[in-house]
Amino acid sequence: MVKNQQDAEDIATDAFVRALDQEGFFDPEFKMKAWLYRVVTNLSLNKLRDRKRHNWILEVHGFQLIPSTEHSAQEQLEAYQGAKRVEERLDHLSPLHAEILRLRYWEDLGYEEIKDVLGVSMGTVKSRLNRAQTHLGIILSRKERDLVNAAK
């Protein structure tokens, strides 16, 4: 499902760790195979969703994360450098905006989780995230434009 050996191994490890914590997992009546299948499927879907979420913020600003199994070392390096540029630009945002972008795209928290972490309303989460994305776009555009002008 995840099309990446390392991610698949991480998911399998996570599933077995969860199995050890699952009460009754080793009981003869427990449907171990069905439980493991469901957990691994859910973890895989979460990984795909998280990967998409991470890529979204980069793709919006012209950068793209590239899975290592499909592209050259040069393409991987360029993708990594693009991600680093985005991350560095977070320091140019207000602390509130940088925090909400980190929670959403680097910590993979959903809106409800962000609401709980920040202790704000859902409307505040949505509007703050939208403003943060807009400001990040402006900063990225300005910085990239400055680099092009400096190179001339």
Image (cartoon, rainbow, N blue to C red):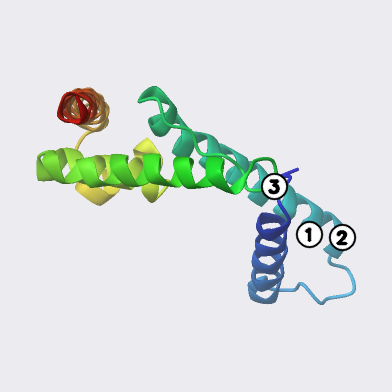
Residue occupied by mark 1: 36
User: Whole-Å distance between the Cαs marked 3 and 2?
Assistant: 30 Å
- Badge 2: few (under 14), some or many (20 or more) residues near its Cα, within 10 Å? few
| Residue 125 spot, x, y in % from top left | 24, 33
Give the answer, above or below, for where 29 lies relative to 60.
below
18 to the left or right of 97: right
Q: Which residue is mark 3?
A: 69
Q: Which quadrant is home to the C terminus?
A: top left
What residue is pinned by disc 2? 33
Instruction: From the top left corner, tell me how far across and down residue 81 is, in percent.
Output: 39, 45
From the top left corner, tell me how far across and down residue 127 is, in percent: 21, 24
* Occupied quadrant, residue 21: bottom right
Indicate the amino acid at tag 3.
Thr
Q: Front-most of 52 and 89?
A: 89
128 is higher (above) or lower (below) than 39: above
Which quadrant holds the N terminus?
top right
Q: Is residue 96 above or below residue 13?
A: above
**Amino acid type assigned to the residue bearing label 2 in the image:** Lys
In the displayed structure, 19 sits above or below 6; it is below
Looking at the image, tell me whether mark 3 or mark 2 is earlier in sequence order. 2
The amino acid type of the residue labelled 1 equals: Leu
Observer-side mark, 3 or 1, equals: 3
Disc 2 element = helix
